[in-house]
């Protein structure tokens, strides 16, 4: 397979690495700009000694670069945590379509921060491999896997679970995709949820003069606990005071703790 990879973050790095180890031909690699990328050097190192065309996401709309990609005669695209909307002009260059790895159980939590909204909104959590269309996370579904949210999960711990599940699901699904036998299930476009980057502003500020349902407040704080990033906060003497939550699940083998004392 002649593949155009669009990669960012740990999942993008591991996906590109695994495809290369599997003997696939990476003809082009699209990465995030330096100020919006993670694992960028690890990703670029994987193609540094090859003839792979390497572009930044900001260069993808240039007609000259689209011609360069077309000249490579790619078969398919693989997008892994690539946070840029792909235009029709690019997608039309890929006869086999473009596969995306998304950390949500679509149609729930299209868009960004699925790990946050699965906790805050109590929506189903999981991962999806799907085809990209001109919408945002609206393309046909190939495969999905549920990733349960525990009461002790934070935004950080849930995100890590989603990363691992996403990569494993892609590995399991790729042989069918490669063979052209992957199932395609259309999404219900009227169902599910969608979030933009700015939506977290609705939950980040805690008003100390306001009453909250305890569960809602707890979920907001733990969902936005993702060091080193700032999360929920309140104002004190003109300064933001940020909160991070540590949740420790009881060890059932440790003698019962308080429950034993109450008996």
Image (cartoon, rainbow, N blue to C red):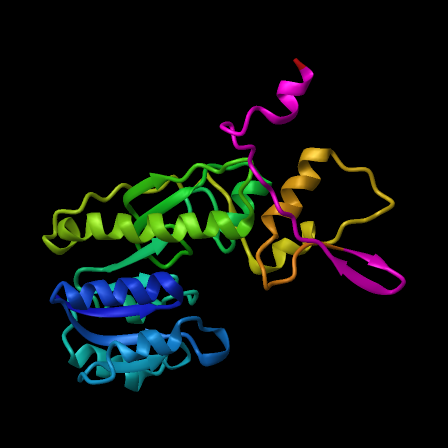
Residue 174 point in image, percent of width and height: 18, 53
- Image quadrant holding the C terminus, namely top right
Label count reads: 0
Residue 123 point in image, percent of width and height: 51, 37
Residue, x 30% and y 50% (percent of image)?
A: 129
Whether residue 239 is in magenta: the answer is: yes
Q: Residue furthest front?
A: 255
Whether residue 248 is visible to the viewer of this picture, yes or no, is yes
Residue, x 22% and y 78% (percent of image)?
A: 69
52 on left or right of 89: left
111 on left or right of 6: right
Tell me which corner region of the image, top left, top right, bottom left or bottom right, holds residue 27. bottom left
Whether residue 103 is visible to the viewer of this picture, yes or no, is no
Q: Is residue 51 above or below residue 90?
A: below
191 on left or right of 17: right
Residue, x 45% and y 73% (percent of image)?
A: 37
What residue span does the magenta drawing correspond to? 234-262
Tell me which corner region of the image, top left, top right, bottom left or bottom right, holds residue 236. bottom right
- Image quadrant holding the N terminus, namely bottom left
Residue 121 point in image, percent of width and height: 58, 39
Q: Residue furthest top?
A: 263
Q: Is residue 179 above or below residue 106?
A: below
């Amino acid at each position: 397979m002649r593949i155009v990879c669009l990669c960012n973050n740990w999942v993008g790095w591991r996906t590109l690495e695994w495809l290369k180890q599997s003997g696939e031909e990476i003809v082009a690699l699209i990465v995030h700009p330096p100020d919006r990328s993670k694992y960028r050097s690890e990703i670029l190192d994987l193609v540094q000694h090859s003839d792979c065309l390497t572009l930044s996401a900001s260069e993808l709309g240039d007609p000259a670069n689209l011609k360069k990609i077309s000249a490579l005669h790619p078969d398919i695209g693989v997008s892994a945590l690539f946070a840029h909307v792909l235009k029709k002009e690019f997608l039309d260059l890929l006869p086999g379509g473009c596969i995306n790895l998304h950390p949500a159980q679509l149609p729930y939590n299209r868009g960004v921060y699925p790990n946050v909204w699965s906790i805050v909104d109590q929506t189903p959590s999981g991962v999806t491999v799907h085809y990209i269309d001109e919408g945002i996370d609206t393309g046909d579904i190939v495969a999905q896997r549920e990733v349960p949210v525990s009461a002790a999960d934070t935004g950080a711990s849930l995100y890590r679970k989603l990363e691992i599940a996403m990569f494993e699901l892609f590995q399991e699904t790729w042989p069918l995709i490669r063979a052209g036998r992957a199932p395609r299930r259309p999404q219900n476009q009227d169902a599910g949820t969608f979030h933009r980057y700015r939506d977290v502003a609705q939950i980040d500020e805690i008003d100390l003069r306001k009453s909250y349902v305890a569960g809602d407040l707890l979920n907001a704080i733990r969902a936005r606990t993702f060091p080193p990033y700032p999360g929920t906060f309140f104002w004190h003497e003109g300064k933001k005071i940020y909160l991070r939550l540590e949740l420790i699940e009881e060890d059932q083998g440790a003698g019962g703790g308080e429950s034993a004392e109450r008996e």
